[in-house]
Each structure stands twice: as structure tokens, then as C-alpha cells.
Amino acid sequence: MSSNHVNSPNMKVEVVLFNVSDVDRTKAFYENLGWRFDIDVVEGDFRGVHFTPPNSDASILFGKGVTPENSGSAHNLVLAVDDLDAARKDLIARGVNVSEIFHYAGGPFNNAVENPHVGGRDPQGRSYFSFASFEDPDGNVWLLQEITTRLPGRLWDSPPADVVTLATLLHETAEYHDHYEKTHAEHHWWDWYAPYLSARQNGSSPEEAAAAADLYMEEVLPVLSR
């Protein structure tokens, strides 16, 4: 069977579903993690709360009536991080009980061997091979997997933005840059445009993107120009 995806429809992991025993308690837990709160829907006996991890394309939906009552806890939900130490430090600072860093004796996710978890980072320092874990109040287990470099073929090609969308975004960027241009010294417009556009494409609001562009001009660009 061909693995060519050129003619395949787009399919993305969008949402992971699980029930919890105390919706408000679990909602507070994920809010404390700094995850984006999206929606809280109540309809009769159903309640669904939607959160998205930082910069993730996939989200979680938990609550009451979300899955069959006998579905139990979710295990080994995986969060990719580019810096495992920083991710652990952030979670611990938020009061989360995070495991020590470990690797799998038989390779990532191999629980078929005896004593599959081995303390410490992967001895060879390989991307994909070092982990830590934590649980939410209902015992749903999250794995932090450090991925510093993607294996060949593990990134989808991004489709080019359509002309109308790009034109709209450039127009918006010009409007926000206009204020900066009037209040700051002479500079190259493209230096401000680049961080603004990057932030918007990564999900920031126009105001957040403008702040990111200002910060880049004030702190990052001077260092790069030395």
C-alpha cells in the first residue's frame, strides 16, 4: 500500500475524549497548567470542557457523558516537548507531581519488557527517547516526550496560504506596524513584519503579535545586529 499522501484528504488528531469524576476540579487542574481554555458546554446530563495545550493542534475534551461510563482513565496521553527539563520545571512550579526523567529499556512506549522504565535520560541523548510523566486528578496519565529533532518524513508539508488570506494578514500587519513606525526610530519594516506574522501564524492575537514584534525590535534584533 502506498504511503504517498499527496492525494489523501487532510486528517489531523483533533481531540482526545475522557470522562472525569469532578469536572470543576479537573477544569481547575488544566487551567493551572496554563492550557488554553476553549469552551464549557452543559446540555442536560452532558458537560464537556475543552482545553488545548500550548501551541498544540490537538485538544482534550473531558466532562460527564463524554465517553461511555465504563471507559475508565486514559493512559499514556503524549505531549511532545522540545525541552524536557524546562517542561518539568514549569509543571512543578504549578504544583504538579511530575516523575523523574526516564527512558524505556526496550525503546519508546515498549511496556512489554520487564521493568520497562529506566531512570535517567536516554544514554545516547536521542530525540524521542527521554520521558517524564504526570497525572490529573482522575488518574489520566500524561507522558512528556522530548522531541528535539523530527525523524525524516515525520513532518507534513504545509500548504501555501491562499492569496486572499495572505493579503488580509499583510494588511493587518501594516496597520499594526503603522503605530510602531510613528513612535519609534527609523528601521526596516520587514524586521517588524517578520515576528508579527510569525506570532499570528502560531495563534497569537493581533495585540499579542504586535507586542512580540515590539519585543523583537527592542531586545532581540539589537543583539543579532552586533
Image (cartoon, helix red, strand yellow):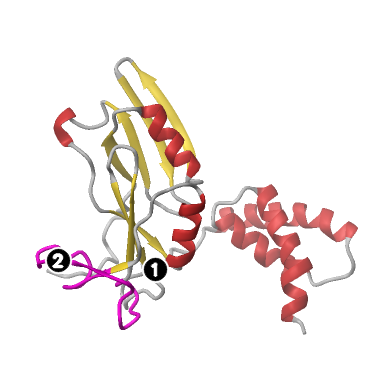
| Mark 2 residue type | Asn
Residue 198's image quarter?
bottom right
Q: Residue furthest top?
A: 44
User: Depth check: 48 or 103 in front?
Assistant: 103
Instruction: Sort mark 1 into few (<14), some (14-19) or many (20+) by Cα contacts within 10 Å.
Output: few
x, y (%) of residue 82?
A: 44, 68
Where the C terminus falls, by quadrant?
bottom right
User: Depth check: 215 or 141 in front?
Assistant: 141
x, y (%) of residue 127?
A: 35, 75
Q: Is residue 78 above or below residue 115?
A: above
Bounds of the magenta span?
A: 103-129
Q: Is 104 included in the stretch rendered in magenta? A: yes
The kind of secondary structure element at disc 2 is loop
x, y (%) of residue 20?
A: 29, 32
Residue 192's image quarter?
bottom right
User: Depth check: 59 or 179 in front?
Assistant: 59
The kind of secondary structure element at disc 1 is loop
For the point 90% across and 67% down, which residue is it? 185
For the stretch drawn in magenta, the main secondary structure is loop
Residue under pointer 2? 115
For the point 54% across and 57% down, which residue is it? 202
x, y (%) of residue 67?
A: 22, 32
User: Depth check: 161 or 198 in front?
Assistant: 198
Residue under pointer 1? 157
Where the N terminus falls, by quadrant?
bottom left
For residue 1, the mark is: none
Left or right: residue 222 versus residue 67 is right
For the point 50% across and 48% down, which residue is it? 94
First in sequence: mark 2 or mark 1?
2
For the point 49% across and 42% down, which residue is it? 32
Residue 50's image quarter?
top left
Instruction: Sort mark 2 into few (<14), some (14-19) or many (20+) by Cα contacts within 10 Å.
Output: few
